[in-house]
Image: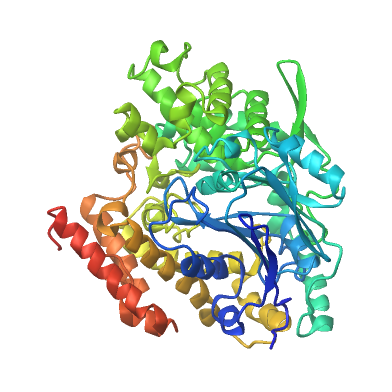
Amino acid sequence: MGLPGYHMRILRVNLSTGRVRVEEPRVEDLELFIGGKALAYLYAYREIPPGTDPLSPSNKLYFFTGPFSALVPGASKVTVMAKSPLTRLLTDSHAGDYFGPSLRKAGYDGLVVEGASKDPVYLYIDSRGAEVRGAERIWGKTTREAIDAVKRETSAKASVAAIGPAGERLVRIANIIFDYERAAGRGGLGAVMGSKKLKAIAVLGDGSPPRPADPERLQAEGEKWYNYFATSPRYSDIREYGTTNGLLYSAALGMSPAYNFETPSIPEDLAAKLAGDSIKEVEVDPPWYIHGASCPVKCARYTEALYKGLRFRVKPEYENLAMLGAATGVFDRDAVLYFNRLVNDMGLDSISTGNVIGWLLELVERGLIGEEELGFKARGFGDAEAVERLIRLIAERRGIGAILAEGVKRASEILGRGADLAVHVKGLEAPAWDPRGRRGLAVSYATADVGASHLRGWPSTRDPPSAGPAREVVESMARNRDDDALRDSLSLCRFVSYPSEAIPPLYKLVTGLERGLNDLYKAPQRAEALARIHAALDWLVPPIHDDVPPKWMKGQPTGPLKGVAAFLDERDKREAIREYYRIRGWHEILGVPKPETMEELGLPWARGDAERALRTVEERLRAAGIELG
């Protein structure tokens, strides 16, 4: 039995044995979890036991598409899922454009990679099947060199995901680069590929996407929405600048990560050095494949710049510019663009890399680390030479870079200093949005299943956005979290932002299933509940770990929001987080889904796990001498 909008084919590759097989997903799983992000969490929950070493062959890597992929304009995303070597939590990250639709056109809804090869390999997939091939000759190469080599050996039209030297060296902030510039960046998933000796995955989409329930009406609706997004004035800014204008917005709102989150409000003229018009001065036409045929917005900006006599191309985004630039205090546009190119080639998460380097430079500023430990002389914030050197040292795991390669939380523990300056949640480095400028965003960071992510829901805004108790906007944040996660499950790009009410009719045209929006939101709610249970059975103690870094509990030091913190006080923080637990049907103090909640979500088989997770968290709290209440 099948379901329209799906091939009903999941490709599973065991690198330990070399076995390749195709399995059929269960229809009830697709109906409950849809695809993409939510379905990946279900698979990971079932197949990766709590306590699994993220860098062992027992960890698994999932590349899942959603039912809209290759069928609906803007459905370009692929979900990548594994247990994170950085946080030890089940973690999803998403890459756009070409890989997901190619996987669908090759005849698969998803790919599962398990086991580990003894020697370097890459995987080639097309409509005829999949093959594991030797990769010794490209091991040690940059992502760009590896992608070039794999395309020469397979097809110029193949979409290739690859790791760089950072992933090979098991750097915990290593990412996976897709087609040179797109990244599944968060959580160190590149290190998981490296632990499996998997250098790359090439997919040639030489077949057709699955047949939807109503192809004629879907085509008509697709054309309507494509034209809307391509012409509507509402999307003119993102069509013009992509996300590169972000630093102007975050600086004005008091939300920038400047100087390791020390200065959320920075002058407009300083922010403009790393923003839209400055980037457009060096903008060039992108390669043919960068947007994909289905993208009506085409927001990706490609640039060509010159740094130290080297001419190079790169596709910057706000997070790259803000974290590699503003967070490190470097506002030299061409230098920051070069850092962006370098982290892509090395296979490093630009967010985590900028975060951990910004943290180290603050230690330098404060006299907490010197030349002897660093191995070179650094001036502190704004030292472009130091940033470039540190990127290379991290990717190569050399010198001080070997410590930073562990991520900012572990680095502060190894050095024995700077923990109060480290900006992370649950070990995941914070992205380029300081929540002190928008009351309630810190609740999203604190409760996110993966750690500090700006993609786990934003609260509704007030006037001013930093006003009032955080608890009052938690419900709006939870709703936005559901909405964003639903789009991730369908494979929709966040920047092709269909109105929420448009999604159920499109879902019906693709799958033939009649679902209301609230019913569709239950899919990501199920996934989040499973992630929370899994984390609690592994190591998470929500009343302790659902927290934000000390910096965010202090008032902004300067600017129009001087004195404003992420929460009014500790009580406001505790009440807001518990409000989120209540909304989700979790234990109000322990922060774990109640057994009856799993029943209500249609997952009675997880009731026993929820009961065990509640007992486990309570026992850990009592063992730590922490009273409930």
Q: Which of 324 and 110 is in front in this view?
A: 110
Please state the horizontal and vertical placement of residue 3, each as a whole percent of the image.
Answer: 69, 84
Query: Position of 212 compared to 116: left or right?
Result: right
The residue located at (73%, 83%) in the rendering is 4
At 62% from the left edge and 32% from the top edge, which residue is drawn?
274
Residue 493: quarter of image: bottom right
Residue 281 in view: no
Q: In which quarter of the image is the N terminus?
A: bottom right
Count the marks: 0
Q: In this view, does 347 lie above or below 467?
A: above
Task: Give the colouring mode of the picture.
Answer: rainbow
Compared to 89, does 8 lie above or below?
below
In the rendered image, the quadrant that contains the C terminus is: bottom left
Query: Who is closer to the viewer here, 115 or 465?
Result: 115
Q: Residue 81 falls in which quadrant of the image?
A: bottom right
Residue 345: x and y, percent?
Answer: 68, 34
From the top left corner, tell me how far across and down residue 605 is, in percent.
41, 82
421 and 79: which is toward the camera: 79
Residue, x 85% and y 67% (percent of image)?
Answer: 207
User: Is residue 276 among the parts visible in the rendering?
Assistant: yes
When the figure is inspected, residue 604 is found, relative to residue 242, above or below; the finding is below
Left or right of residue 235: residue 226: right
Which residue is found at the position 84% from the left and 82% from the top?
A: 216
Measured from the top left, where is residue 8 in percent x and y? 70, 77
Report whether 134 appears left or right of 116. right
Q: Is residue 260 above or below residue 295?
A: above
